[in-house]
Amino acid sequence: MMRNTNSGAILLCLAACALTAVHAQPTEIVKKSTGGLAPDGNQVMNLFIDGDFESQPPEAACANATQDKEQDDAVHIYEGNPAKEDASHKGRYCLGLDLKSDKAVFSFSKPANVKVDASKKYRLSVSSFIPTETVVLCTGYAYNSEGTQVRDEKGEIWGYRLLANGPLGAWKKVEITIGPKGSSTDFVWPVETAQIGMNVYLRGEKGTVYLDDITLEEVQK
């Protein structure tokens, strides 16, 4: 479980050193995850749009992740299970991210920003398969109801993070919890938070990494 130590400085450093940015483009395809459930089938609502990628037609570009015009295969939907020896992976599709230099950042577009209640607790989880020696950092910032980025009590940029390191021989699930001040969670919401997004930073060996089952769910207890 990740702990929130110097998150602002880490996020700023990563953003500054990212050499390849995937630029946002408008998207017309916005679909909810299959059945509105978490990918593991539990009866909870997944607030992250199409987080299991099962609603995504295989012939379409990924609706929720931005695409680079010069590297049009930087973000794509992968059909099947790239981790051939891991039979535990469920679903027909996952998200493939191609690292063509030594650093890159992929951003999910505006429709993927999800609304949250800063007085409640949430669990955010991501599954990844990383066949190369690559660091994968999923992170996102907090925004108010008007879409303006908000900061923490110290005036610093706030962000959560989930970190996974390759190479991995199988799918690995990483999760964190986020809640209001005083709650026993990994990260604490800034008080004006009304929505969050997600960026994915890659660093290391060139190749393709895979993400699936991105889930944001309210913790009931």
Image: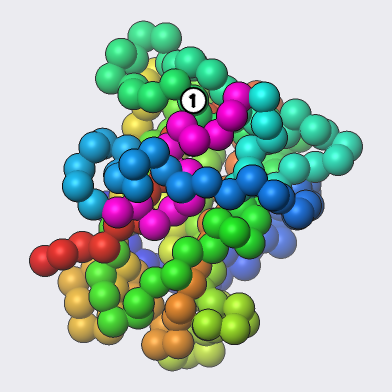
On-image quarter of the C terminus = bottom left
Which quadrant of the view contains residue 218?
bottom left
Decide: few, some or many residues near mark 1? Use Cα within 10 Å; few <14, some 14-19, many ≥20.
Answer: many
Which quadrant of the view contains residue 208?
top right
Q: Nearer the viewer, residue 136 or 106?
A: 106
Mark 1: which amino acid?
Tyr
Going 60% across and 24% down the picture, which residue do you hit?
Answer: 58
State whether residue 38 appears in this view.
Answer: yes
**Main SS, magenta residues:** loop
Going 26% across and 36% down the picture, which residue do you hit?
Answer: 40
Q: Nearer the viewer, residue 88 or 25?
A: 25
Q: Position of residue 132 (x, y in %)?
A: 55, 23
Residue at label 1? 93
Q: What are the residue bounds of the magenta stretch?
A: 45-58
State whether residue 105 appears in this view.
Answer: no
Q: Is residue 121 above or below residue 110?
A: below
Q: Position of residue 41 (x, y in %)?
A: 24, 37
Q: Is residue 117 above or below residue 216?
A: below
Element class at badge 1:
strand
Q: Position of residue 55 (x, y in %)?
A: 49, 35
Q: Is residue 101 above or below residue 21?
A: above
Going 61% across and 53% down the picture, which residue do you hit?
Answer: 108
Q: Nearer the viewer, residue 146 or 200?
A: 146
Q: Position of residue 78 (x, y in %)?
A: 57, 23
Q: Is residue 54 magenta?
A: yes
Q: Is residue 204 above or below residue 14?
A: above
Q: Is residue 162 magenta?
A: no
How many marks the image carries: the answer is 1
Q: Answer with left or right where residue 203 lies relative to residue 210.
A: right
